[in-house]
Image: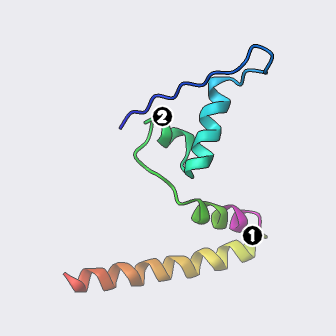
Amino acid sequence: MKACIHVKAPARDIVKTSVDLASKLADALDVSLGYLVGKTDLNVDKSLLDKLLTIQQLPEEDREHILYSIDGLIQHAKTRQAYKK
């Protein structure tokens, strides 16, 4: 789905670049800029991305433990899905 947005601004206003406008629109729609402009089909959940960024900032040992736990939970979920079929 392609959308066209027209923005009119008085001459005295500072005109934002199209990238700034697109970025703000992506933020408002809670999607990535790449997703908004059709460069990717993947729309990453913002809360998941925030959690990942938080994990990335932790000390290495904590990251390893958390990612090990997540890997186990993912494997469990995949196994459960496989047996549902």
From the top left corner, tell me how far across and down residue 37 is, in percent: 48, 34
Q: Amino acid at mark 1?
A: Glu
- Whether 55 is among the magenta residues is yes
Q: Is disc 1 surrounded by few (<14), some (14 to 19) or many (20+) residues within 10 Å? A: few
Write the start and end of the magenta stretch as one range: 53-57
Give the mark toward the camera: 1 or 2: 2
Taking depth in this image into account, of 1 and 34 the one nearest to the observer is 1
Would you name the residue on which mark 1 appears? 60
Residue at the image point whose x is 64% and y is 64% from the top: 52
| Cα separation between marks 1 and 2 | 35 Å
In the rendered image, the vertical position of residue 57 relative to residue 62, given as above or below: above
Q: Which mark is first along the chain, 2 or 1?
A: 2
Would you name the residue on which mark 2 appears? 37
Residue at the image point whose x is 43% and y is 36% from the top: 38
In the rendered image, the vertical position of residue 65 relative to residue 13, given as above or below: below
| Contact check, label 1 and label 2, Cβ < 8 Å | no
